[in-house]
Structures are given as structure tokens and as C-alpha cells.
């Protein structure tokens, strides 16, 4: 019998593969075609994928929306802004409220490109935050409320795509509408 940590790591890897498939499948959706642009300031993407008892949420945004700037002006200032953003992004409870599902956060992963000395990322940096939840009743997930745009006011439009309980959908969240019902 494998240890619980090993099973969780295997499931997280499987969900990452599923998420890639979902992104490809939803890429042809009208909402995606209309709103998806590579690296658009003021726009971020949120993807939700549920498989069994696991729920994966991924937020992807240009660094400008999260840090206030993209290119490291002064290295110390950039690192300080990156650490502040990492702290805000790590607090999933202040960003998301799920209705139904009885979900508990299992893991958080924050990738702030350009926070190292990798010059390849310094042209258009992105921030990716990934959250994996363990849900006792994933089949009862009903809705998501988010305060991402209050925490990061430079995000004016949040394109959301989901595959939950054998349903898929897409919607746009703005400062006036921050709640999605999964239909």
C-alpha cells in the first residue's frame, strides 16, 4: 500500500494532465475564442477542474495585474512585490468561496515568473497560482464567489472555465459580478 502523500502526488499529477486536456477542449468554445488573448493586461484566467473528490483551481494572470509591474525595475523592489503577492495568493480563503462540495484545501502552488534571474521570462511575466482541494461531496459543488478582483484591482476581467460533475461551462467575472453558479 502506498503512503497517502504518494497517492496525493499521483492524483495531483493526474489532475494536471486533465487540466491540460480541459484547456485544449475548451479552447474552441465561443467564450474562449472571444476573450482569450495571450498576455492581456487587466485580464486573468481561472480554470476549475473536478475529478472524483479532487478539485483543481488555477489562476493565470500577467504579472502586471498582480505585482503592479512586469519587468523588474529594481531587483529588491520586485522581490518584495513578489513576496507580497505570494502571501495574498496563498490565502485561498480570501480569494475563493465555494458553495457545496465540503472542500478543504490540500495544496497551493504559486509561480511568479521572473522572480529569479531567468532573463527569458523578463519580457512578459505571468503569475500562476494553483490550488488543489479535497472534497467530501464534490458532486454537490454549486457555485463560486471570488474576491480576486478586490485583492488585485488591476484585474478588470476574469475569464472562468470549468469542468465539474460532468458539466462544463465558461463565464466572465468583472468587478460588478463576482459569483458564478455552475450550471
Image: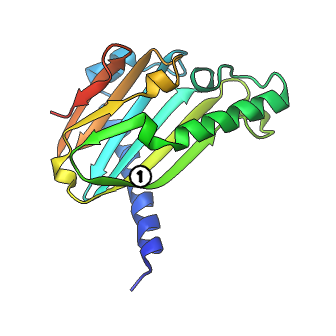
The front one of 127 and 95 is 95
Left or right: residue 59 compared with residue 176: right
Q: Is residue 16 above or below residue 172?
A: below
Q: Secondary structure at mark 1?
A: strand
Determine which quarter of the picture holds residue 93: top left
Determine which quarter of the picture holds residue 120: top right
The front one of 162 and 97 is 97
Local crowd at mark 1 within 10 Å, few (<14), some, or many (≥20)? Answer: many
The front one of 3 and 84 is 84
Residue 166 place in picture, x, y as percent = 17, 46
Residue at image coords 50%, 50%: 108
Residue 53 place in picture, x, y as percent = 27, 59
Left or right: residue 75 compared with residue 10: right
Quadrant of the snapshot with the C terminus:
top left
Residue at label 1?
132
The front one of 28 and 8 is 8
Amino acid at each position: 500500500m502506498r503512503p497517502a502523500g504518494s497517492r496525493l502526488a499521483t492524483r495531483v499529477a493526474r489532475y494536471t494532465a486533465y487540466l491540460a486536456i480541459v484547456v485544449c477542449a475548451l479552447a474552441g468554445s465561443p467564450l474562449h475564442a472571444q476573450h482569450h488573448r495571450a498576455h492581456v493586461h487587466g485580464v486573468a484566467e481561472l480554470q476549475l477542474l473536478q475529478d472524483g473528490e479532487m478539485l483543481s483551481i488555477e489562476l493565470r494572470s500577467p504579472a502586471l495585474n498582480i505585482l503592479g509591474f512586469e519587468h523588474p525595475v529594481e531587483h529588491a523592489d520586485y522581490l518584495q512585490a513578489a513576496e507580497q503577492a505570494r502571501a495574498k495568493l496563498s490565502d485561498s480563503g480570501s480569494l475563493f468561496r465555494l458553495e457545496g462540495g465540503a472542500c478543504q484545501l490540500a495544496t497551493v502552488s504559486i509561480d511568479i515568473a521572473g522572480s529569479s534571474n531567468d532573463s527569458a521570462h523578463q519580457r512578459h511575466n505571468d503569475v500562476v497560482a494553483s490550488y488543489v482541494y479535497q472534497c467530501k461531496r464534490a458532486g454537490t459543488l454549486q457555485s463560486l464567489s471570488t474576491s480576486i478582483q478586490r485583492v488585485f484591482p488591476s484585474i478588470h476581467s476574469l475569464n472562468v472555465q470549468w469542468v465539474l460533475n460532468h458539466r462544463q461551462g465558461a463565464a466572465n467575472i468583472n468587478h460588478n459580478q463576482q459569483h458564478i453558479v455552475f450550471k
